Image (cartoon, rainbow, N blue to C red):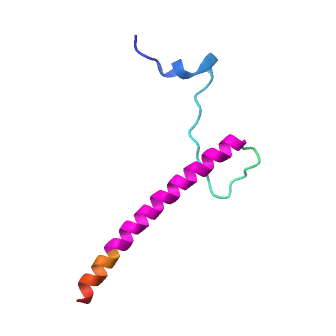
C-alpha cells in the first residue's frame, strides 16, 4: 500500500509550514522552538552567503593576479 501524504499528520492536523524569516519581523508570537528554527535557518543562510563570498573573492583574486602580470 502506498503511503499517503497526510499519513504523517496525527488526527488530521494540517501540515506544518517550513520556517521562513523576514528581517525585522515581530518575534513576540514565536515560541522558543520557532525561534530556534529561525536561528538555525539564518545560520545556514549565513554559511551559504560566506561560501558564495569566498568563491567570488577567490575568482577576483585570480583575475587580479592575472591582469597585474
| Front position in the image: 69 or 30 | 69
Looking at the picture, how far across and down is residue 36, in whole percent? Answer: 64, 46
Magenta: predominant secondary structure element? helix
Q: Is residue 41 above or below residue 56?
A: above
Residue most extreme to the bottom: 69
Up the image or down, 18 lies above or below 23; here it is: above
Task: Name the residue rendered at 52%, 59% in the picture.
Answer: 46
| Highlighted range, magenta | 31-59
Image spot of residue 54 (x, y percent): 40, 68
In the image, 47: left or right of 58?
Answer: right
Q: Is residue 19 magenta?
A: no
- Quadrant for the N terminus, please: top left
Residue 29 located left or right of residue 68: right
Q: Is residue 16 above or below residue 37?
A: above
Front one among 40 and 29: 40
> Where, quadrant-wise, is the C terminus in this rendering?
bottom left
At a point 55% along the width and 55% down the height, the residue shown is 43
Q: Position of residue 57 (x, y in %)?
A: 38, 73
In the picture, measured across the screen, residue 54 lies left or right of residue 20, that is: left
45 versus 2 height, above or below: below
Amino acid at each position: 500500500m502506498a503511503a499517503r501524504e497526510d499519513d504523517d499528520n496525527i488526527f488530521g492536523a494540517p501540515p506544518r509550514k517550513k520556517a521562513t524569516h523576514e528581517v525585522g519581523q515581530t518575534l513576540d508570537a514565536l515560541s522558543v522552538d520557532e525561534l530556534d528554527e529561525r536561528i538555525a535557518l539564518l545560520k545556514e543562510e549565513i554559511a551559504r552567503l560566506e561560501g558564495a563570498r569566498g568563491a567570488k573573492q577567490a575568482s577576483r583574486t585570480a583575475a587580479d593576479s592575472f591582469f597585474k602580470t
